[in-house]
Amino acid sequence: MTFNENGLILKEQNIGERDKLVTVLTANHGVLRAFVRGAKAVKSKKQSATSKFCYAKLSLYQGKDSYIIDEAQSIEMFFGLRDSIDALALGEYFLELGFVFSPEEQAAEENLRVILNSLYMLANQKRPPKLLKAITELRLLTLGGYAPNLVACDKCGCFETPTMYFDMEGILYCENCAPATAPFALPLGVVSAMRHIVFSELRDLYNFKLDDALCDELCYVTETYLLRQTGHKFKTLDFYNSVQAL
């Protein structure tokens, strides 16, 4: 049975001389893999529409062993990502995050929308890249079941003190209750930003600003928390960080 679905191409792999296998993130079916027959032919209309980073309208059907993309029409290519190696590297990382944190063949509408919104804002320079990185990491962690407990101090229930403390188990403490082992002393502005990312409606997710110093702290904490919680080695993150170090 053929069905239509909009999807973001996360990965592509050449198969033989004419075909390729793509990994797609969709709203209704989550992550799925599909063959694109004849995609590498010079006159193929499916070639660009099934390339990595492309958000496309897809017509699919399920063959005996896999999905097949019968038709593909590009919706958005995010061309602005190609303007700098920094943006392209971060965009690659967003795609990997989408792959790791999105379910296979289950609804994943918000995962898709977060990745699409982050790619759009990155490609069009709507928000600072580091802020987009932190937002994407922490929101996808939340969607994946790794949300930290940011409601109040874990010991006394205090909502805020000028400095809060956060450990990599995802627990928040006020300045009066923090154990000596809590590694991160966070300004209240960073805690407020983390709460916004975790709890806000998707339409409001990107509607806040941080100065550079606080953004650097937020970015460091979300990355460290992600790596500690998942134990996953993100090759695209390593590449992005190597580009930033140049």
Image (cartoon, helix red, strand yellow):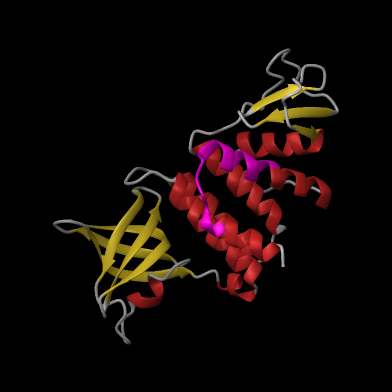
Q: Please state if 52 lies on the left or on the right of 86 as rendered.
A: left
Give the residue furthest to the left: 64
Secondary structure of the magenta portion, mostly?
Answer: helix
Give the residue furthest to the bottom: 42
Question: Which range of residues does the magenta coloring cover?
Answer: 221-236
Q: Please state if 109 lies on the left or on the right of 242 as rendered.
A: left
Q: Quadrant of the C terminus?
A: bottom right
Is 156 above or below relative to 102?
A: above
Residue at figure coordinates x 74%, y 46% from the top left: 208
Is 105 above or below relative to 56?
A: above
Give the residue furthest to the top: 156
Location of residue 4 (image quadrant): bottom left
How far across and down, in percent of the image, does residue 42 sit?
Answer: 32, 87
> Is residue 90 something one can see in this rendering?
no
Is 57 above or below relative to 230?
A: below
Residue at figure coordinates x 62%, y 38% from the top left: 225
Residue at figure coordinates x 66%, y 65% from the top left: 243
Residue at figure coordinates x 82%, y 17% from the top left: 176
Is 170 above or below relative to 128?
A: above
The answer to which of 4 and 52 lies nearer the viewer is 52
How far across and down, in percent of the image, does residue 154 sit?
Answer: 68, 18
Residue 60: in magenta span: no
Give the residue furthest to the right: 162
Q: Please state if 164 lies on the left or on the right of 244 as rendered.
A: right
How far across and down, in percent of the image, does residue 201 sit?
Answer: 59, 39
> Is residue 213 something one can see in this rendering?
yes
